[in-house]
Image (cartoon, coloured by chain):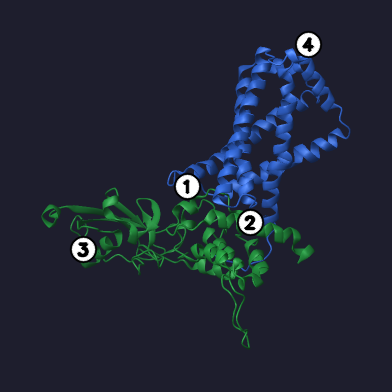
Chain colours: A blue, B green
Amino acid sequence: MSATESQPDASYLLRKLHSLTGILPVGAFLAEHFWSNSAALVSADKYNQTSAELQTIPFRIFVEWAFIFLPMLFHGGYGVWIWLRGKSNVSQYPWVKNWLYTAQRYTGLIAFVYIGWHLYTERFLTQGRSTYASVEQDLQNPLFLTFFAIGILASSFHLGVGIWNFLCKWGLAATVRAQRAAGQLGVLVGVTFSVVGILILISFRFDWHPFASYINK
Amino acid sequence: MAEAAAGKKVIVKVKRQATPKEAAHWEEFALNWRPSMNVIICLRDIAENPVTSDGKPTTPITYDSNCLEEICGSCAMLINGRARMACSALVDSLEQPIRIEPLTKFPVVRDLSVDRQFMFESLKRVKAWIPIDGTYDLGEGPRMSPEVQEKGYPLSNCITCGNCLEVCPQVNDHNGFMGAAIFSQVRLFNMHPTGKMHAAERLKAAMGHGGIEDCANAQNCVKACPKGIPLTESLAEVNREAWRQALFGWLVG
């Protein structure tokens, strides 16, 4: 290690952008995605309606690439680069936040691989026209179901820890007390997303629509 | 006490290397237990009688230490795998054999003595001082409020021991990350009423190579700090000031 003269560093902006894209738009999209897919908890029709609505948004290709695919590719790709530049020492210092540091890297990679596969099977193979029936059919395959569950849990965990990281790293939660509160918010988001995600899976797998009664009113 | 202690041994294993390039090897020592022994006393006892536990004569162990009360910051080393100050590492609270190794994030000079120049260079890069000298008498600086004094005092306790760098997963050979202690000093000098006058320069350095963005929030630093410095608060605050400077510096100066 040697100290060099201080000069503006491009990696500063890239790191900041990495941190920001994790929340906006990637984290926000995850929230939207779980929200839209929750339509399955009401009924297959509601799901198809919601899905059709999204499939016909104006500027769809542009919106998808600018706000979903490219930010995810950057966040995931640069995230791997960051991982390679760190050296986990959790076996030597098994402290909770150090575990989170390591877990954040593994869950990030799992989520990245999962999302790539998920996009391929549910977005590109279906030509962007997936329906309740097509998703339901996919989830009859136990391997699909397992990978979906792993992907949902990894993404939710990664977002939860990411929110805490983001608030600390941007100095929005600077004091010890604020950082603790940010951590609690992260736990809340991680757990909520995990539960909702798994409920959606159960809905598709077992044709279970707990909010079906909303329709008949 | 003396009778009870008779014959009680302290087993110490030390990782040694005679020169910076040489491969390291371990030596074991069996020392006579005494009350209130700490790791520095063990190293002194070895220097008095440098013979390994299997009776082979060896050289005294090279190590840095000075104040023996966690004030000078020189005796940081790995004790049973953890970075800490040797002077406050009490033998009775340690599992035996006690394994003693040099810090791994700094180049070894000899045995347990490491070269912490990287930290001093980093402190220079972020201008961790307050310029008060001029070609003429600059007069008195602004008064410091008690609030700022109270916030600054804990930060001024930093002893540059290097423990926060040692335990940080982001401080390594691929990464020039300067480490928590450095950014805590940026915070200290940027909150000082006179130091503030150079706040932008320090923040720019903090955004340079090995800067604050390499922090990945593992938060080991704050757990390892022997002085209880709120390092994670310092990192968060300097981070916030840095992006504000990056975003608005060119707009509002």
Please name the residue that numbered disc 2 is placed on.
B239
Q: Which residue is mark 1?
A: A89
Q: Do the residues at discs 3 and 2 belong to one chain?
A: yes
| Residue at 63% across, 23% down | A198
Q: Tag 1: residue type?
A: Asn
Q: Amino acid at mark 3?
A: Pro
Q: Give the Cα separation between the discs numbered 4 and 3.
A: 91 Å
Secondary structure type for disc 3:
loop
The residues bearing labels 1 and 4 have C-alpha atoms spaced at a distance of: 56 Å
- Disc number for residue B57: 3
Please name which of the two marks, 4 or 2, marks the residue nearer to the observer: 4
- Say what amino acid the circle numbered 4 marks: Asn
Q: Quadrant of residue A144?
A: top right
Packing grade of label 3 (10 A; few <14, some 14-19, many >=20) is few
Q: Earlier in the sequence, mark 3 or mark 2?
A: 3
Same-chain check, marks 4 and 2? no
